[in-house]
Amino acid sequence: MVNWGDFVIVVVGAGIGVAAPLLIAALGEAFAERSGMMNLSIEGTMSLGAALAFLVGALSYNPWLGLLTGMIGGLVIGVMNVYLAQTLRLNQVVTGMSLYILAYGLSVYVFRATTGHVSTFGLEVPRFKPIEVRALLQIPILGPTIFNQNVLIYISIVLVIILEIVMFKSTFGLRMRAVGENPSAADNVGINVYATRYLCMMWGGAMAGLAGGYISLAELGLFFEGMTAGRGWIAIAIVIFGAWSPLRILAGALIFGVIDSLALHVMVVAPQIPFQLLLTLPYVLSIAILVIAMKRAALPAALFKTYRREERQLG
Amino acid sequence: MALAVRLSQYFRVTFSVAISILVGFGISSIFIVAIGSNPLAAYVALLDGAFGSAQSVSETFIKAVPLIFTGLAAAVAFKSNVNNIGGEGQMYMGAIATAVAALSIPVLPSFAFIPLLISVSFLAGAFWAGIPAYLKIRFGADEILTTLLMNWIPFYIVSYLVTGPLQEADKIRPQTDFIPDAARLPAFVLGYRIHWGLVLAIIACVFAYVFLWKTSLGFEFRATGANLEAARAMGIRVNRRMIQAMVLSGGIAALAGFSEVAGTVGTLKLGSSNLLGYGYAGILVALITNLHPLGVVLSGLFFGILIVGSESMQRGAGVPIAMVYIIEAIMVVTIIISPILMKKLGLTWSTGETS
């Protein structure tokens, strides 16, 4: 007999864990898109971040150094993307897909070249484990859900608040949104469109690398080919669902995480349902999220559009 | 005179692509040197793996078949302003439909069975692509994301089928029974695995070229892709054209799955499935030819060489197989930016046909 109270607590607790990498990647992508750049490479960037974070984390036995390396790897992919898409003015679908394949390939390549294996189920890596503060854990309901998480989750929540302020209350946020809405007007008032987009894409890449590092260092403690399983794309769907705002993205990621976690736990209590059916749920759910969000979505007006300074309207 | 101009354009394009490929291999060398291997030895191993024997040439062509289909699918969609990134899932749908139909309906003679399977798999892929097309037109849901997300669903359907209701009679391996011989695409060179799927793929590319460039409906597809607003102003029903392009693209991608199940493999399976990744690679295959259907034949073959060659590169030169992804991506970028860089450097450049 299932104890439903415990079941809900377990589902929500795990759901927060599922939400974390999506949230981190989405927070980066939101800034990139707000500046007018679509970064379609984040699925591959996450894989690269996961591989680098795992390798450096395992070799140095320092997970923080691992995360940092994953972020730097992601940042490099972000720079390449913005260089190709903004400086060389290639189509953003082309650059995104190419860099997705490049980053994905690099993750497997680097891993194989360093360890001699395609995946590691043996290599020891220091993981980010839940912080166990006894006093907090004993709080009913909140204890086992919110206070039974690893440190990265608390950091990302703080980050949400900081980023919400940066996006809507800071000069930089205002300028960034202007660049995404009307780059030629922004340019006319002296905002550096290129610099803004480079910065946002670097941030987006670094966050995707961090999200990958979360998966390999906090969630699983291992790396294997294809481990990101489309979560980079799901993160982009959550950005749209969250209307490009950090707080709403947090809500979107949590809703998604809890429903996904519910499916995984149903698998355990109801083994008669084919598990493959439940595994398709995140993707079906993401599509549903997109359809719902699109009815009221206000995309950054210049999203996907390469800025061409010589074509700007003066005025 | 006109012919001479065209020939000189073709020559320039060929020359530029050849240089880009060399540059691409040059840049890729950095990654090979970084792990302490010798790039020259690696590339010799690559070419040897792809062309070393008649057998390996046959394998290279076999790998090219699904890539030509998925590449053509991407080219048709992108050319018409729909970003179909769902070739992977549509290919799986085609594979599923082929296996299910071939195993469930009574055995027919080949001349009827094979066209029937082609139609069934085409429809399955077309249906799968129709969903995101509908969601885009009806709700404005971005098709890049919906097609991508829909890639995972058929993957799990295959996983369910080959371990559940459709698993082989022996119930050992995660795969279906082999489909009847009458449903198989025959090999066309005795003793080698290369099969008629290659011919079908090339025919599909020729059809697509004729359709897009020589018919008025095809013109409307291209006009929609070239400039949506202008096409609408011309009275073209752009929404309808985009849905049609997406559905056509999905059907073509499904034929990659058909040719794998009915041609190369003979069964539907997962795990060792060599289906994995052709859909994504197909997008790059289309991009490096500037979305030209006939170019897809060559670029599909090029990717086939890289894929088959990468296995021998790992055996012969110790370069991980994943190098193939790196080379693929670098090739796309070098080939696409070469005209831009040449322009920046002040070299004259003509792209041949426009839109």
Image (tube, helix red, strand yellow):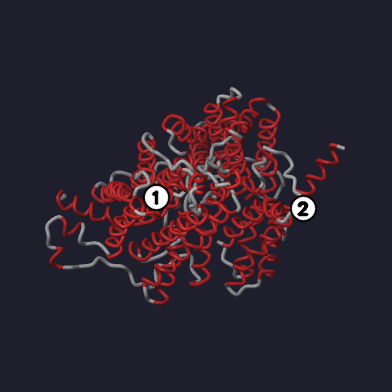
Provide residue A139's location: percent of width, then percent of height.
Answer: 12, 60
Image point 64% across, 64% down: which residue?
B27
Q: Left or right: where does residue B306 sit relative to residue A97?
A: right
User: Label 1, label 2: how many angstroms apart (C-alpha)?
Assistant: 47 Å
Secondary structure beneath dot 2 equals helix
Mark 1 burial class by Cα count in 10 Å: few <14, some 14-19, many 20+: few
Check the image and report above or below for A156 versus A303: below
Provide residue A68's location: percent of width, then percent of height.
Answer: 41, 68
Provide residue B23's location: percent of width, then percent of height.
Answer: 69, 61
Pointer 2 residue: B15
Image point 31% across, 63% down: which residue?
A152
Image point 36% across, 66% down: which residue?
A217
Mark 2 burial class by Cα count in 10 Å: few <14, some 14-19, many 20+: few
Check the image and report above or below for B23 versus A314: below
Secondary structure beneath dot 1 equals helix
Pointer 1 residue: A174
The answer to whether residue B177 of the structure is visible from this angle is no
Q: Residue furthest right?
A: B1
Count of all numbered marks drawn on residues in the image: 2
The answer to whether residue B346 of the structure is visible from this angle is yes
The residue type indicated by label 2 comes to: Phe
The residue type indicated by label 1 comes to: Leu
Mark on residue B295?
none
Labels 1 and 2 touching (C-beta < 8 A): no
Q: Left or right: where does residue A171 sit relative to residue B112?
A: left
Check the image and report above or below for B8 versus A49: above
